[in-house]
Structures are given as structure tokens and as C-alpha cells.
Amino acid sequence: MVSYNDCLALLLDLKTKGINTNEQIKDLVTKGSVTLEALKFINDNRELDLSKFYEKLRKSYNNKKSNLYINIMKTLDEPTQVITTLNSYALQVTLFSKQLEDRDIFFKCARLEDVYKCLLNYTKSYDLIPCIKILNLIKTDIKTLESIYR
């Protein structure tokens, strides 16, 4: 998800483009954490790449082209399903990033490094718990971002 520092950087970027972000910056600094209001404001003025990506996943599922979205959103019980879903997610993040200018923030927000760490850990220890936890975090991220753009 979007970190505090990334959120602040995005608000400052909007400010340099002439958008009044004083209230959102003040609220962010006062609360010391990312708020849904700040994310909604950013997304309304500059659609988040992560939001576009998750919307693309959902539309692909709705058009019956891909099951990745539903596999993330449902509880997977087989180890191969979990690993396949994480690998598919990592691949889709990487492919989607080709069209972006700021890949660093997108990769961080999409938790790509964490996904690869979980997959590497799984190949060494066959411990599925971190993989399930990261899938649950991604699921939470999707639900959060869907709540701000719907």
C-alpha cells in the first residue's frame, strides 16, 4: 500500500502542479499515518498507478480473461494455488510497470519485493504462511483502493 512518505511525496507533487494540498498535507502530518481521505484526494487528482493496476485485474476477471483477481480475493487452500497466484501477481505487476514513469513507487506500493521474498523463502523452507499473509495484505490493499474509487 502507499506509505506515509510516498503519500506525502504524491501530495507535494500535486502541489507543484498547482493543486491546493495544504489541508491534506496538514492532516497527514498531524495524524502521522496515511488516511483514506488523503488517498482519495490523491486518486481524484492523479489516479494512483496501483489503483489502475487493481482495476485492470478486476476488469480482466470480469471479462473472463484472467482468474488472478478472484484468486487473490478468495481464500486459497492448496499450496500450488497460493504460489501460482503470487507468481502470477508478480508477473502482472512487472508487465504493468512497463507503461509507467515512476516504477519505484508502484513496485513498493504493489509489495513486489515482499512477494519475491515470500516466494524465495518458500523455495527454501516450503513455509506457506508468509505467502498467505502477503496475499491477505494484497487483498486488503485492493479492498481499500476499491473503496476510494467506487
Image: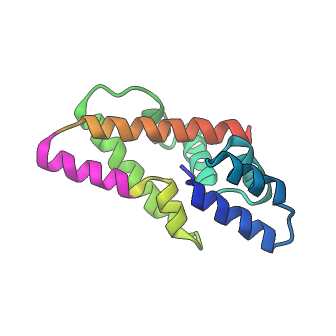
Left or right of 55 in this view: 138: left
x 37%, y 58%: residue: 113
Which residue is more in the foreground, 47 or 81? 47
Which residue is more in the foreground, 143 or 1? 1
Residues in magenta, as a range: 113-126
x 44%, y 27%: residue: 74
Q: Residue furthest left?
A: 124
Left or right of 37 in this view: 80: left
Q: Quadrant of the C terminus?
A: top right
Across and down, in percent, residue 139 comes to 49, 36
Inspect this view and state whether residue 98 appears.
no
Across and down, in percent, residue 137 comes to 45, 39
Across and down, in percent, residue 44 comes to 79, 52
Check the image and report above or below for 71 versus 47.
above
Check the image and report above or below for 31 versus 82.
below
Locate residue 117: give its quadrant: bottom left
Q: Main secondary structure of the magenta part?
A: helix
x 57%, y 47%: residue: 54
Across and down, in percent, residue 37 comes to 74, 43
Locate residue 78: give its quadrant: top left
x 66%, y 56%: residue: 48
Check the image and report above or below for 134 versus 23.
above
Q: Is residue 127 magenta?
A: no
Q: How many marks?
A: 0
Inspect this view and state whether residue 90 appears.
yes
